[in-house]
Structures are given as structure tokens and as C-alpha cells.
Amino acid sequence: MQEELTAGITLNVIPTKQFKTTRINISFLTELSEHSELVMRTLLADLLETSSQKYPTQKDVALELSEMYGASFGTTVDRRGQVHSLNFILNCVNDNYLLEKIDLLAKSLAFLQEMIMRPLVDKQGFDQATFTRQKQNLKAYIEAVKDNKQTYAALKLQENYFETELQKVPLYGTVADLEELDATKLYHYYQKVIATDQVQIVISGDVDPVLVQAQLKKLALPARPKKQLSLTYQQAKRAVVTEVSERQELNQSKLDLAYRLPVSYRSKDHYAALIFNALFGGTPQSRLFANVREKASLAYYANSSFDPFRQLLIVQTGIKATDRRKAQALIAEQLVALKNGEFSAEQLEQVKLHLLNAYESRLDNQQTEMTRTKLDLLAQRSISASEWKKSLLQVTKEDICRVAALVELQTVFFLDGGQS
């Protein structure tokens, strides 16, 4: 059931008896205008997860969740295309499984109202001690990312591929933007988020949709201007491939490649692109795994991933520094082979079966269905599980070759470990 509670706020209830839990997702969504907002929203997520006026410490929050029969609560941030989402997620036992009569759903919504709408603030802004602690924690996290060289290489590839700062900057933001923040500035931004972000509320469980709608009034979220958010980020083709190298003393070099693949989420070629990626480097049956990693032994790992929201295909490999040119040439050969249809009907069916099995296994995950509902709203198109499977199975060899022909290398980032 989908309902507009008020302007800019939608509710989706997914009644199901499949799970013994009730799961609530409240997402604040917007298209960002400044890259500094990325770190602001990340820090907001940390602050609003760990404290409120009624529960000023993490211990207080944990004790209240314990009183709610071990409910779990957390915040996350994510970015799909141009849309950024700040999410509040609570999971609790369904009322029907409690020995005593208690409206745990109502208690859960009251808890969320406290954590979202009543942050721990003083006259100047967020409580200074709490703000300082969470700011220090976030700075340590951002700086620690540099130690994971696979992630570091992927982020450097992203930085050099994208044209806009909002896409260049990592999801969690930068230390430079974090240093500019104070408790007052962040509190003013919080007030803007609460007043203007589009809000999606998704509730899954054995619940009464009418009762849920009535209880949600307790959240007291104000109406806001209704906006249609643009999910897809599109970047123009670059005429010349950008190649960037960086030297560090490492045991393993990283060779990452970014390709433009102009296929958007839920478009007619979306399913062909999924299968193409699986054949290229997205599964153990892929050409990158079989030919680059196993047969030629040119990579410790070699895989690909496709982001339809940013129309981006990424290849990540771990190699010896001396194998850079050979590895890059062999990766290019695998793409050409797919463009030429050099895969058998049996390989195509195996990959389809792999994708179907992975899809079906996710259907048993409560959060997966809720995320899909959220994306349906953003994409303005919903699709059932049976329609998804049918669309995938209908993809032909010609469809895959056509999608492969759209793939164009744009950026190469090489993290030279210096080893022989």
C-alpha cells in the first residue's frame, strides 16, 4: 500500500507474515547542491543514531532498545545517481510474538520520533561534547580508508572519472569539509533537512496499514515542497582516455578502469547490461576471472561491477607492477570478445541461472524488498519478481553484444606498488 501522508512524505506498507519482525525505514532524500553536504549528512547520521534529548548517551539508547525486546536501530547514508539518502532503520519483534500485550510498533515509532525530531542540542547547536566526539570518530574513519588500498584505488578512479565534484567526492565526504563544520552550522543544516528533504517511510511486517498510518502522525514531520528527484546521473563521453598513476610501496599494485556504459536503471537494456557485466567480470563464470586471473595468472583478483544509476562500469584488479600493460591489454581483449559474441549458449544460461539464484535468495531478506520499494518510487516504475525474472530470461545474445558495444573506456588509475 502506498499513501501520501502529506506533501513530500510518502508511506509504503508491505504487509507480510513471512518475517517475525517489523522493520521500519525512514529515509530523507534530496539532490545535493554542494559536495560539503556529503560529510554533513554522514556526521548527522552518526549524531542522530547515538543521542537525543531523552537518550543523551549511546548507553541510554542501548538501554531503551533493550527494553523494546532487543530492538535494533541504526542510521545509514547512501547515494544512487544524484539522490542522497539519510536513513533511519529500526527492527523489532512483531507484536504477535510477544507473551505480554504491548504495542511495540507504537513504541518503535515514538522512539524514532525522539531520535529524529529531538536531537541533543543546546542554545548554540548540537551538544558540543557529543558533536566533538562524533566529528573525531568520523575523521579517524575517513583517514583510515587510505589504508585499504583496494578501496583507495577505487576512490581515486572515481575522483578522476567524474566531471562534477559531487560525484568525485566519496559518499562519506572529505576531512577538509569536515574540518569546516561546527556544532551550530551542522544544526542549521539539520533543520533544513527536516524541513525540505523528501521523506519515504517503508514499513514491512505483519501490520495493519490503516493503524500504521494513524500511528505515524506521532512523528510530527512537517509538510514540505514536493519534488521529483532525478535518480540517474549522466556524464558525456570523454574524447580521450584519462590515465593516472601513483606510486606507493606495496606488496600488490592496483589497476582499475572506468568505462562509460549509458544504460540506466530499469531501462530496456538494463537486464542485458546485468548479464553483460556477469559475463565480463561480475561472476566466477566471467571472462576476467577465467582468462585474466586463472588462465594467464596476471591478477590476484579481477572483477567488474555496473552502476546503472551513474551509468558506470568499473574493473578492479590486483596485479604485479610489471604486468600492468599485459593485464590492461588482456582486459581489453575480453571486452572485444563479448562485443563479438564470443560466448556460448551454455555460458549465457549459466550466468542467467546465477543471477536468478542470487535474486531469489535476496527475496528472503526483509530489507531487500524495502530497498526495492524505495527505488521503485525514485524510478517511478515498479516491477514484480516474476516480471524481473521474465525480463532477464528474455535477454538474447544479440542484446548482450549490443550493450557491450556501448562500453567505452574513459579512465585508468594505476596504483604502482613498485614490486617486480
Image: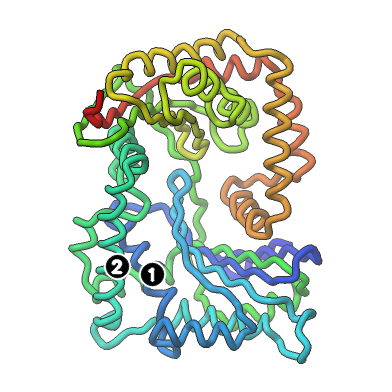
Coloring basis for residues: rainbow
Residue 350 visible? The answer is yes
Secondary structure under the numbered disc 2 in the rendered image: helix
Residue holding disc 2: 137
Task: State whether residue 303 is above or below residue 396.
Answer: below
Amino acid found under the numbered disc labelled 1: Asp
Q: Which residue is found at the position 64% from the left and 13% from the top?
A: 343
State the mark number for residue 46.
1
In percent of width and height, residue 413 lies at 30, 29
In percent of width and height, residue 63 lies at 51, 87
In percent of width and height, residue 70 lies at 61, 80
Task: State whether residue 15 is above or below residue 394.
Answer: below
Q: Which residue is found at the position 51% from the left and 68% from the top?
A: 88
Amino acid found under the numbered disc labelled 2: Asn
1 and 2 marks in contact (CB < 8 Å): yes
In percent of width and height, residue 54 lies at 44, 90
Quarter of the figure that contains the N terminus? bottom right
Disc 1 crowd, CA 10 A, few/some/many (<14, 14-19, 20+):
some
Discs 1/2, front: 2
Mark 1 to mark 2: distance in Å? 9 Å
Disc 2 crowd, CA 10 A, few/some/many (<14, 14-19, 20+):
few
Quarter of the figure that contains the C terminus? top left
Task: State whether residue 302 is above or below residue 88.
Answer: above
Q: Quadrant of residue 106?
A: bottom right
Secondary structure under the numbered disc 1 in the rendered image: helix
Q: Which residue is found at the position 56% from the left and 14% from the top?
A: 338
Residue 7 visible? The answer is no
State the mark number for residue 395.
none
